Image: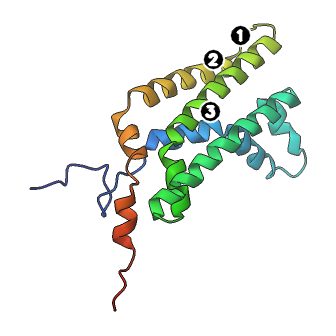
Amino acid sequence: MNFSHITWLDDRGHIKPPLFLYLILVFLARGWCIFIASLTQFNDRSGLVRLFYPEKTDFILALVAGVGAVFIYGLIIAERKRSWLILRPLFCKSIWFLWFLLILDGVFLLQRIVHDDYLFKLGYSLDALFLFWSVIYVLKSKRLSYYFADWTTEDNDSHQPTKTQ
């Protein structure tokens, strides 16, 4: 049988993380991305942050929500290497943690909209649109659910050397 048409498996037969999962994690960690980008400006480091987050509390809330996305990214790295066996149960439950982060980001978006007295802003609408598509993707994607269920105990047992007498 020829399985060359299945592009979502790696050489070892494990499911690769979907690209849209990485985009969701960057979206959820956008506060950290903006913070890191602002460190490259020498004359006004807070200018870029104020462009995206005029209120300091909104920026701090984005950093808080982004910590979870960075944690899920660390779990993905651990899964790809099949190391840190203690993280395997957390990885299997990380779909629920991703749901929590999406809901938390939606609550923070509503808080920012209320803070601006329900005025329309393009940034809020783009955030809401990407949040909407992310929720639909996490809800309907079979590949994502297969990916989060792929790291099993049998995988770890086959990689460990056996003891000979």
Q: Determine whether the residue tagged by mark 3 lies in a helix, strand or loop.
A: helix
Which residue position holds label 3? 101
Rendering coords of residue 127 (x, y %): 62, 24
Distance of label 1 from label 2 (alpha carbons): 8 Å
Toward the viewer: 148 or 73? 148
Which residue position holds label 1? 120
In this rendering, which labeled residue sits more in front, label 3 or label 1?
3
Distance of label 3 from label 2 (alpha carbons): 18 Å
Residues at circles 1 and 2 in contact by the CB criterion of under 8 Å: yes
Q: Determine whether the residue tagged by mark 2 lies in a helix, strand or loop.
A: helix
Q: Which amino acid does label 2 sit on?
A: Ser
Rendering coords of residue 14 (x, y %): 34, 56
In this rendering, which labeled residue sits more in front, label 3 or label 2?
3
Residue that protrudes farthest toward the front in the picture: 165
- Residue 26 shown left or right of residue 46 in the figure: left
Q: What residue type is labelled 1?
A: Phe
- Rendered-image quadrant of the C terminus: bottom left
Label placed on residue 125: 2
Sooner in the amino-acid sequence: mark 3 or mark 1: 3
User: Dot 2: within a 10 Å radius of its alpha carbon, few (fewer than 14), some, or many (20 or more) residues?
Assistant: few
Hey, which quadrant is residue 26 in on the image?
A: top right
Residue that protrudes farthest toward the top in the picture: 118
Sooner in the amino-acid sequence: mark 3 or mark 2: 3
User: Dot 3: within a 10 Å radius of its alpha carbon, few (fewer than 14), some, or many (20 or more) residues?
Assistant: some
In this rendering, the answer to whether 61 lies above or below 9 is above
Q: Determine whether the residue tagged by mark 1 lies in a helix, strand or loop.
A: loop
Toward the viewer: 125 or 105? 105
User: What kind of colouring is applied to the model shown?
Assistant: rainbow
